[in-house]
Amino acid sequence: MLVRLGVLALIALVAGPSAGRAGSPPPLTAVTLNLWHDQHDWPARLPVILSALREAEPDVILLQEVLQHDGLPNQARTLADSLGFHMEFFTVDPADGPKRYGNAVLTRRPVTARFVRKLAPLDDWRVAGLVRVDVDGRPLDIAVTHLHHTPEGGAIRAEQTADLLDFLAEVRGDGPLLLGGDFNAQADAPELAPLFGTLTDAFGTLHPGAENVTTLNTAYGHQPERIDHLLTSAELTPVASGLLLDRPVGGVWGSDHFGVWARWRWNPTAAAP
């Protein structure tokens, strides 16, 4: 169920100057979603999530709170196998550990490189991951993260944001960058200013009057806040964005977060292979 906020922006996609241009890469569509690990009946939630992802038809899916343990196959792997996507999982947990928890990138295109950083402060167990894919001869970097969660933890998120930017500067290639995840802070939070001052917030750019939009599911007692974001470098221009999994299906919610989706066109400077 894609929220209707993206309708006007979809018109821009059709009419935009790069639409249909010979040699341009196809529009890029991505989703970010906090999976809420195995809470509230994962087997019931799984088909709801899969249905929404199939409807959105993304090229990239960024996941947070991905869990695996002896009784639960890796949730990102389950989704990737069902959708026919490639998957990279990022965690601070050891590969042979009985329980592993982290973030994942799912992509239609094969991954040509991957990088991971344990974010400072290390005792908060947060991680950022980046993969590189080839889009018709053009490199695209895709990064995912999940920042500290407490409302009073702005200083911790600020440290994580600084470390994240350092990581991106260290490993980023020559192509555009897509960064998404659960930042546990709204777009105007001071601790996110270095990110939002450098990258473009797709949803916020296309819906500047949507202050009351939430990506936290208030049905589970959350305060309404937009804390899940999709950001890109200047080589990509957002043309549509909205929410998904923002309504229950048969009484089942997909997660305690709503997903965020966005679509971008490649700018001419990024279009040439």
Image: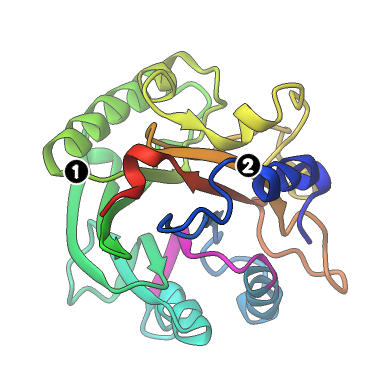
Question: Looking at the rendering, in which quadrant would you find the N terminus?
Answer: bottom right
Magenta-colored span: 55-68
User: 48 or 19, which is in the foreground?
Assistant: 19
Q: Amino acid at mark 1?
A: Asp
| Residue under the image location 17 percent in, 77 percent down | 96
Element under label 1? loop
**Residue 174 badge:** 1
Q: Quadrant of residue 209?
A: top right
View extreme (left): residue: 170
- Magenta-colored stretch includes residue 228: no
| Residue under the image location 83 percent in, 70 percent down | 249
| Residue under the image location 45 percent in, 86 percent down | 81
**Residue 70 badge:** none
What is the C-alpha distance between the residues marked 1 and 2? 25 Å
**Residue 16 badge:** 2
User: 165 or 120, which is in the foreground?
Assistant: 165
Mark 2: few, some, or many residues within 10 Å (few <14, many ≥20)?
Answer: some
Question: Looking at the rendering, in which quadrant would you find the C terminus?
Answer: bottom left
Q: Amino acid at mark 2?
A: Gly
View extreme (front): residue: 22
Q: x%, y% of residue 255?
A: 66, 60
- Magenta-colored stretch includes residue 57: yes
Q: x%, y% of residue 171?
A: 14, 44
Element under label 2? loop
Q: Nearer the viewer, mark 1 or mark 2?
A: 2
143 over 228 or under it: above or below: below
| Callouts 1 and 2 close, C-beta under 8 Å | no
209 over 231 or under it: above or below: above
